Amino acid sequence: MRKKRSRSVPKPDMKPSLLYTALWAAAVLPLTTSAATIEERLKELETKVSQLSAENAALKKQVGLDAKGNGPALVTAAGKEQKLSIGGYLQVNGEAGDAADSRFPASDRLLVRRARITLKGTFAEKFDFVFQSDFGNNSIGGVTGYRAQITDLAVTWTQHELANLTFGQFKTPYGYEQLLPDTKTLTVERSLSNDSLTLSRQIGAMVSGVALDKRFSYAAGLFNGNGVNNGANDNDQFLYVGRVNGTVLQSDQATVSLGANAFTTKDTGTFTGTRTGRGLDAQLVAGAAGLYAEWFRTHFDRTTGADTDVEGWSVLGSWQLVPKRLQAVLRYETYDPNLAVGADDTHVWTLGANYFIKGDDLKISVNYLLGDPAGPLSDQGRLLGRFQVIF
């Protein structure tokens, strides 16, 4: 009898199980990782959307838009200028006391000293323009019936730094303190000699420029010579004016600048003859201290009658008591309307302070003037106060 051969039962093969496990892991793990990545990305998107919403709300607030997107009307340039800006400033004065010099009334008063709107623009072709109008008193003396009047209206070609050309009505280049912007003077009012012997604004043409890394500047021009907002000329002659200015010392400790200016003109009217003037000025700034001096002399060569020489000068010192916040000023000035006549000169002391709330943009100035004007009166005290806003 043949012996029955026994069959051996094969052992289970583990390879298919390992294969199934690997396939399962390959299918499930990416899904898990993908789900985590999607959640992270969603959170990141939500954060960015929240940030954009906050930025959008801030931008709407800056441009004046409300929650519905309504806002102020936009002002755009009608011409082709590259830049256009609108601004201005307001100066409100309060005064009390005596007439410290001939410019002031002997009464207390409140006045809108200056209220100016300024429009400036720049063209890509190197032309600038400025238009400024004043709606205030625009004078130390009393003015009734305030009305709009042009202060500056000029066009300047700025192609060459060494020779800019300006046409229109603007400040003549004569007198350091006169050329300072009204918002940056260290005292409430300029000195008597500066107001009396400079030429203010005129209608004319001027060439000006800078050199030596802007340490030297010059200006020269011709003007009608009949004053501001006056298109007439009293004769066929012009007023000729020139000024040079230079920084002679500049270091970390101090800056020293010197200036000189002169003019000549032939007049017909209340004065008939030739009028010539000259002036010198110096500025020293060292840390918190400043020292400023200016001198003028004008000669009146009359066609008929005696000639006249007028002279005036001033010295002003300043000190920053609190940097960029509180400044003290002290000035002494003298003015003689006729050097050939005695006892007709005026002397004035000015003690003051400037409080800068936000630089010159928000500034309060207080001055006390003690004057010895021409005539029998002396020790004439006057208190001046000013609040200034630049916008």
Image: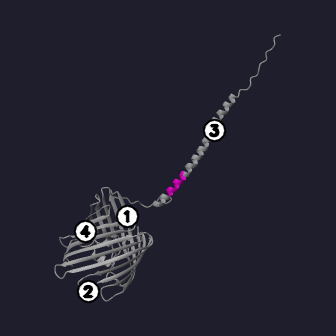
Residue type, numbered disc 4: Gly
Residue 99, can we see it?
Answer: no
Q: Which mark is residue 86?
A: 1
Are the residues flagged by discs 3 and 1 in contact, CB closer than 8 Å?
A: no
Q: State the residue at coordinates (52%, 54%).
A: 53
Which residue position is annotated with label 2? 342
Are the residues flagged by discs 2 and 4 in contact, CB closer than 8 Å?
A: no
| Start-end of magenta stretch | 48-57
Q: Residues within 10 Å of mark 4 (few under 14, many from 20)?
A: many
Identify the image quadrant of the N terminus: top right
Residue type, numbered disc 1: Ile
Which residue position is annotated with label 3? 29
Residue 60 lies, with reference to residue 31, above or below; the image says below
The secondary structure making up most of the magenta span is helix
Front tag of 2 and 3: 2
Query: Mark 1 or mark 3, which is nearer the start of the sequence?
Result: 3
Measured as percent of width and height from the top left, residue 349 is found at 36, 81
Are the residues flagged by discs 2 and 1 in contact, CB closer than 8 Å?
A: no
Which residue position is annotated with label 4? 242
The answer for how far apart the CA atoms under marks 4 and 1 are is 31 Å
The answer for how far apart the CA atoms under marks 2 and 4 are is 32 Å
The quadrant in which residue 230 appears is bottom left
The question of residue 30 being in magenta is answered with no
The answer for how far apart the CA atoms under marks 2 and 3 are is 108 Å
